[in-house]
Amino acid sequence: MSAPNRRRCLRSLLLVALPLACAAIARGEGRQPPRAPTIGTQQAGFSLRSRGMESLPVALEGYCPVTLHDRREWVEGREQFAAAFDGKWYYFADERQRAIFAAAPETYVPVLAGDCPVTFVETGQRVPGELRHGLMFNDRMYFLAGFEQVAEFQRAPQKYIDADLHGGGICPVTYAETGRRVAGNPDTALTFAGGLRFYFVNAGARREFLQSPGDFLTDDASGIPTWDLADSTLAPAPKSNRVGATAPDSSQSARPQPGVVVEAPRSAQADASEQRPAAANEKSGGVNAAEPLFSGHCPVSIWKDLENPWVPGRYEHRKSIDGMIFLPAGLAEREALIADPALYIPALGGDCVVTYVETGKRVRGSIWHSVQVPATHRIYLCADEAAAARLKADPDRYAGVDLAAGGKCVVTRRDSGEEVPGNPLIGAWFEGWRYLFVDEAAREKFLQDEQKYTAPIGDN
């Protein structure tokens, strides 16, 4: 079959269930995305030989996962725009698509790394899915082995949608350290080891896992490959080896580390070495770890120049707020963040408000799909283009999802029994909620006794 005919066939057979409708943009609140970060390629003049990526197979037969997921379009990726994630190369249509992927890879990788979830559930075997038997369900891409498996998935999707959930969702860190089978929190989800999804009891357990995954996984863990990433070169596998490439014998191999291989040119690496301690530089992955919000850009500079808002933050100025990491660009920006955190924390702590309202799930948003509202000094990081369009089309449905008390001033309500709307520019962030106040005095009272004003009215 010719390439054009194949693409038409694949388009026609990609089943779409529960799609996110791309509504027309009704408001001019969207901004231009940040300039694409410099991502290492062979042309950039540096080597990843120590990463050992040459033998890794290419996912999706080289089609761009971002355009497939966001636009339902089959666009061939280009080798010069490649990124490695979870033991596979992904090719992208251009630099921007690769940067979008790097900001949120788990949004775009297929379930089980493209293997058939029905076959895995029914037999325990990892069988590659076919691109012509793909479907989208709950905003995740699944590829099935054949028509029979497609029909079975459609008949009972709930049986198969979590086929990639390792250990039924128990926390591998808690189990390894205590022997207890404790359910992990879906908000901590991590894709690793051949498309498996891991849950952890909290962010601390997730960070501990990322520091040394091998300490918490046994060699007989279901479906976990152990590719040897020791002695190879940067170049992706040749096109002739894209499909069906197999991993080398894993008897003496090391596990691949979590993360997307995204590196800057040597000059940028040298600059980074002055900013970050050695331990941070040695980490192999970025996007899967507890990474800074805004992909490391300064949260304060975003509001200084709306035309050019994306200023890289600096590690030595980092600030942790309610478990979130921010990288201000300088001392002045750091002081501004500390003085009024609620003014700079993104809505829902950087998670996609549209996904949360529609599914109840916390999915990390992307700076590439951000919506900024100067009037309320809020920035929303959406999971994809469709989510950003829905937010712009119906802001009343999504914009206030993280507002405590519906945006009413809790101090006025507690002290005088009045329901008065708070000022969106006078707020406080407390335990994942944004509180608004009628004036600065009310905010000061709240900050002096947060427990009093967050407790139900009937409590003493």
Image (cartoon, grey):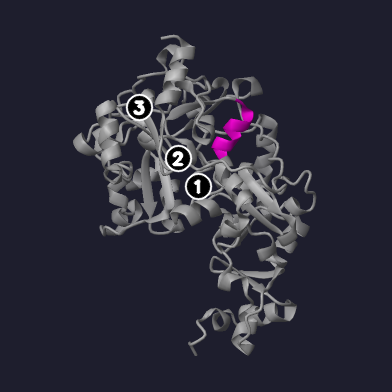
**What quarter of the picture does the N terminus occupy?**
top left
Q: Residue at x 69, y 40 (%)?
A: 34
Residue 81 is a magenta residue: no
From where the camera sits, is residue 58 visible? no
Q: Residues within 10 Å of mark 1 (few under 14, many from 20)?
A: some
Judge the density around disc 3: few (<14), some (14-19), many (≥20) Cα neighbours within 10 Å.
many
What residue is shown at x 35% (from left), y 36% (from top)? 112
Disc 1 target residue:
289
Q: How many marks?
A: 3
Is residue 70 depicted above or below 47 in this figure? below
Chain-order first, disc 3 or disc 2:
3
The rendered magenta stretch, by its main secondary structure, is classed as helix
Task: Specify the amino acid type for callout 2.
Answer: Pro
Label annotation for residue 258: 2
Tag 2–tag 1 contact (CB < 8 Å): yes
Determine the CA span between mark 3 and mark 2.
28 Å
Q: Amino acid at mark 1?
A: Ala
Determine the CA span between mark 1 and mark 3: 32 Å
Is residue 277 placed above or below 256 in the rendered structure?
below
Residue 228 lies, with reference to residue 336, above or below; the image says: above
The answer to whether residue 95 is magenta is yes
Instruction: Say what amino acid the circle numbered 3 marks.
Output: His
Element on which disc 1 rests? loop
Question: Which residue is denoted by mark 3 in the rendering?
Answer: 133
Quadrant hosting residue 144:
top left
Q: CA distance from mark 2 to mark 1?
A: 8 Å
